[in-house]
Image (spheres, helix red, strand yellow):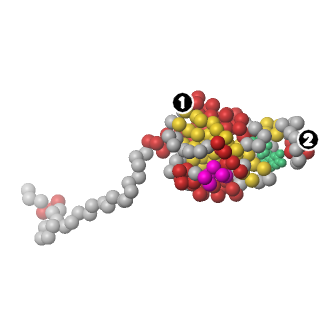
Amino acid sequence: MRILVAYGSKRGGTAGLAEMIGRELTTLGHHALVRPARQVRGLDDLDAVIIAGSLYAGSWHRDARRLVRRHADELRRLPVWLVASGPLDDSALAGEKPPVRQVARAAARIGARGQVTFGGRLAPDAAGFPAAAMAKKRSGDWRDPVHVKRWTIALVEDLTAVEGQPPLPMTPTPTPTPTPTPGATTRTGSDVDG
Ligand SMILES: Cc1cc2nc3c(=O)[nH]c(=O)nc-3n(C[C@H](O)[C@H](O)[C@H](O)COP(=O)(O)O)c2cc1C
């Protein structure tokens, strides 16, 4: 299957995470296209889409949000998963983190099949304010390859199940109800001739 992994990343951490997901998809036998979200112009010939974005001050990366807005109609017709990358601690590993508001809204808008938050990365030599100050206390890499691998395997299992399902009928097929024949009598065991 052809799966797009589009990402919005400010300092390269989420770009690296998208590459990790892409490599797992390839290992599982799929064709992964890893692209910056702002370069995505169309979603033709895709079987699924993963949109990843970094978190800054509680906001999901602008390029990820814009991709959802630009292609909402097409995304609604595809299986889509949303990814956020941020926490500079083990909290993303501890359990399913609830999505930030923008991810929850995007997921509802396009009917995403799932969302996940992975740990983030902050380089010790990060420049700019307030990243440099933060990096003095909280630099490190919390993008866990095992977490990414498990999630990607579960996604592919879900995707394969979606593909295997017959398409939903456009209108529900009415169940035929037997029409009693006028004058007919119901025969029971006791009145069946010998
Ligand atoms: C100024 C700043 C603000 C941040 N705010 C958040 C936040 O609100 N939530 C979160 O989970 N992570 C936050 N992070 C951590 C980043 O999301 C993490 O470093 C991420 O991996 C960055 O992705 P990128 O390298 O693709 O830009 C913040 C980092 C910086 C430097």
Quadrant location, the C terminus:
bottom left
Residue 62 screen position, x and y as percent: 71, 51
**Residue 148 is drawn in which quadrant?**
top right
Residue 43 screen position, x and y as percent: 54, 44
Q: Residues within 10 Å of mark 2 (few under 14, many from 20)?
A: few
- 99 left or right of 140? left
The residue that appears at 80% across and 53% down in the rendered structure is 57
Q: Earlier in the sequence, mark 1 or mark 2?
A: 1
* Image marks 1 and 2: residues in contact by CB distance under 8 Å: no
Residue 115 screen position, x and y as percent: 63, 48
Classify mark 1: helix, strand or loop: loop
State how far apart marks 1 and 2 are (Cα): 41 Å
Read off the magenta span: 65-70
Residue 52 lies within the magenta run: no
Q: What type is the residue that disc 2 sits on?
A: Lys
The residue that appears at 52% across and 48% down in the rendered structure is 78
Q: Nearer the viewer, residue 88 or 17?
A: 17
Task: Answer above or below: position of 169 versus 146.
Answer: below
**Residue 72 is drawn in which quadrant?**
bottom right
Q: Main secondary structure of the magenta part?
A: helix
The residue singled out by tag 2 in the image is 136
Residue 3 screen position, x and y as percent: 56, 38
Q: What label sits on residue 155 in the rendered view?
A: none
Q: What label sits on residue 29 in the rendered view?
A: 1
Q: Residue furthest bottom?
A: 183
**How many badges with numbers are in the image?**
2
Q: Residues within 10 Å of mark 1 (few under 14, many from 20)?
A: few
